[in-house]
Amino acid sequence: MSEYCGGQEPLSKTIIMKKTHILLIAGFMMASCEKQEKWLDVKSNKSDVVPTTLQDYRALLDNDQTLNESEPALGFIGSDNYYITDAVYTSLSGAYLRNSYTWSKEIYEGGIGFDWRASYQHVGIANVVLDGLKKIDKAQNTSEYNSIKGDALFIRAKAFFNLASQFAKQYDKETADTDLGIVLKMTSAVQEKVSRSTVLQTYQQIIDDLLEAESILPSIAVYKTRASKSAARGLLAKVYLSIGDYVRALKYSNAVLEQDNVLIDFNNLNAALAFPFPTFAAGNPEVVYHCIMTGVTISTNSRMLVPDFLYQMYDTDDLRKTLFFNTSIPSQIKFKGYYTGENSAIFCGIALNEMYLISAECEARNGNKDASLQHLNKLLNKRYRTGSFTALSAADAKQALAIVLRERRKEIPFNGISRWIDLRRLNKERDFAVELSRTVRGTVYSIPPNDPRYIYPIPPEEIRVTGIQQNIR
């Protein structure tokens, strides 16, 4: 199936050519659709070059097309911010997409599990770098060594988090030490025996990687396709939010905002444009770390429609209503507010607007309604028509939380798998749990809160090869 294997021209060509000095090992450069065992293997012929220097390892991590353009899509497909017509559903070329769209128990039907393999490809590249760095004298160039190591740790943590958000149970502190997590592949050795960790071990490893990365990464990255301290802190905020640690999530979202808190004034954008937001080349000041989801046919702008209830959540003076949505055909509302500034390249990275939302939510959950709304109002003041915004207020922290979560839904509706992560965590709370439903060719499909189908099945081929335990759907 080609939906996941396609993609746009690599960022390094469309934006700025980062200096890549070696031909990477053939396996590292392959498309994300190939098997993990193949690309982790040793060099296969004399034309392959084994990385041995800092320059080599930096080149591995600067492989934009692999590491910044292949973020997971299953959670996006399963979320509720869009729908497709019956005609589009019928035209999907593989059972994988159709089954994922209707939350079927079996989704692969002999197809390839792209999300699983692409994420472990990221893990594998990171592990090659981390293993290789152990053989290099750090004193040669300490700052570059630390930057490369921090970037690799960040990439591995991000991949583990994406995997955990789709292939493991939602974190529950009561059961996390027994619930099945993901495979924590920690070395580049092909022969390493693999098994599934617990959810607790999974998130502890993600956090450990990010804390180490944050301690050694540069404050500002040369390119936003590389990690920085702010990127690591931003991902820590997202991870801590997802597991309900609101004190630490607040700590790291605030840390990001202490370094950079510039927001785009939506009054300065042109809603008449097909895609009003700056492209990566032009530079979006809110973006801390840039990565995208591309090549997923189901999510291209021409096929994906916005449900009316989501569109109607926006006030008339809310500029997001005209900047986010194309209403040229009222019955077929389409999203155009991609933070990538282009069609179907769905932003999956870390941005300042989400940091404001995380700070606002955590303050509310920690009982500080005034601080919560202060963060939210600062964000919304840049989203409404000049002079039209009235600062929001709340009677108590509970009401403030409801307001924040509503605005979170409106601010980042098409940011990677963020909505999927929110559905999983908020379904644990009675006040915010929702049942999703879709009608396809006259049949209604639904998924209730906390359903086992919120955990995707591991690709059968992976089960066959490794013998790890399958998720129960």
Image: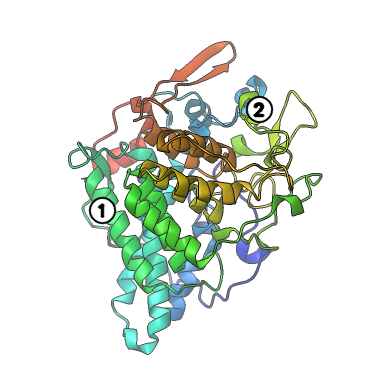
- Point out residue 364 in the picture as x, y percentages from the top left corner: 41, 42
Residue under numbered circle 1: 204
Q: In this figure, which residue is indicated by the disc labeled 2?
A: 312
Which quadrant of the figure has residue 166?
top left
Q: Amino acid at mark 1?
A: Gln
- The amino acid at mark 2 is Gln
Residue at image x 22%, y 37%? 179
Residue 438 place in picture, x, y as percent: 54, 20
| 127 or 385: nearer the viewer | 385
Most foreground residue, 16 or 370: 370
Residue 460 sits above or below residue 349 on the image: above
**Which of the image's four quarters has the C terminus?**
top left
Residue shown at 24% from the left, 39% from the top: 180
Q: Is residue 423 visible?
A: yes
Seen in the picture, residue 213 relative to 335 is either above or below; the reply is: below
Residue 304 relative to residue 39: left or right: right
Q: Are marks 2 and 1 in contact (CB under 8 Å)?
A: no
